[in-house]
Structure formats: C-alpha cells, structure tokens
Image (spheres, rainbow, N blue to C red):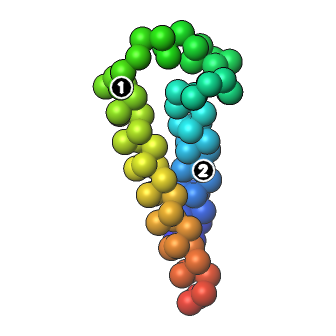
C-alpha cells in the first residue's frame, strides 16, 4: 500500500512540474522559451487554458491526497 502511494506521489509530482511550466507566463519566464510569447498575443482565455488549469488543479489534489495518505500510513503502521 505504501509503495502504491509512493509511486503515485512521484508521478503526480513530475506531472505537476510539467503542467505548471506549461502555463502562460505573465511577462517572460520559462513559458516564453517554449513558444509562450506567440500564444500570448492571441489574448483571452482559451478552452485549452481552462482545461490546463483544471488538469493542474486535479493533479495537485491527487498529490495532496498522496502526501496525506503516506503520512497517515507511516504514522499508524
């Protein structure tokens, strides 16, 4: 059980790093290195941006649940 949550924590951590770096920057940064400057001229909040936000929040919730579950498993086992 602990191994399952450890793997889930590692995978969600890596995915969360990638998802945060994919967000549109607010004036230069890592996102401009990968073509963020081109999409920022389009303006507005696109469907892709909203979906990226939802996926990022969902991944963050999974990460938090894995951290809490591991803490409880370590404490009570």
Residue extending farthest front: 27
User: In terms of image quadrants, where is residue 43?
Assistant: top left
Residue underneath mark 2: 13
Residue 68 drawn above or below residue 49: below
Residue extending farthest left: 47
Residue 76 drawn above or below residue 10: below
Q: From the viewer's perspective, tell me whether residue 45 is left or right of residue 71.
A: left
Residue 27 drawn above or below residue 58: above
Label 2 sits on a secondary structure element that is helix
Residue extending farthest bottom: 76
Residue 65 drawn above or below residue 13: below
Pinpoint residue 60: horizontal percent, then vertical percent. 48, 53
Front-most of residues 22 and 4: 22
Residue shown at 42%/11% (left/top)?
42
Residue shown at 68%/27% (left/top)?
29
User: In terms of image quadrants, where is residue 74?
Assistant: bottom right
Pinpoint residue 73: horizontal percent, then vertical percent. 55, 80
Q: Is residue 49 visible?
A: yes
Label 1 sits on a secondary structure element that is loop
Residue underneath mark 1: 45
Of discs 2 and 1, which sits in the foreground?
1
Pinpoint residue 55: horizontal percent, then vertical percent. 40, 41
- The 10 Å Cα crowd at callout 2, few under 14, some 14 to 19, many 20 or more, is some
């Amino acid at each position: 059980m602990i191994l399952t949550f450890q793997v889930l924590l590692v995978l969600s951590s890596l995915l969360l790093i990638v998802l945060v770096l994919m967000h549109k920057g607010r004036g230069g940064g890592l996102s401009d290195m990968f073509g963020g400057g081109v999409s920022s001229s389009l303006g507005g909040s696109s469907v892709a941006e909203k979906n990226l936000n939802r996926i990022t929040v969902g991944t963050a919730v999974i990460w938090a649940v894995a951290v809490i579950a591991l803490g409880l498993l370590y404490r009570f086992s």
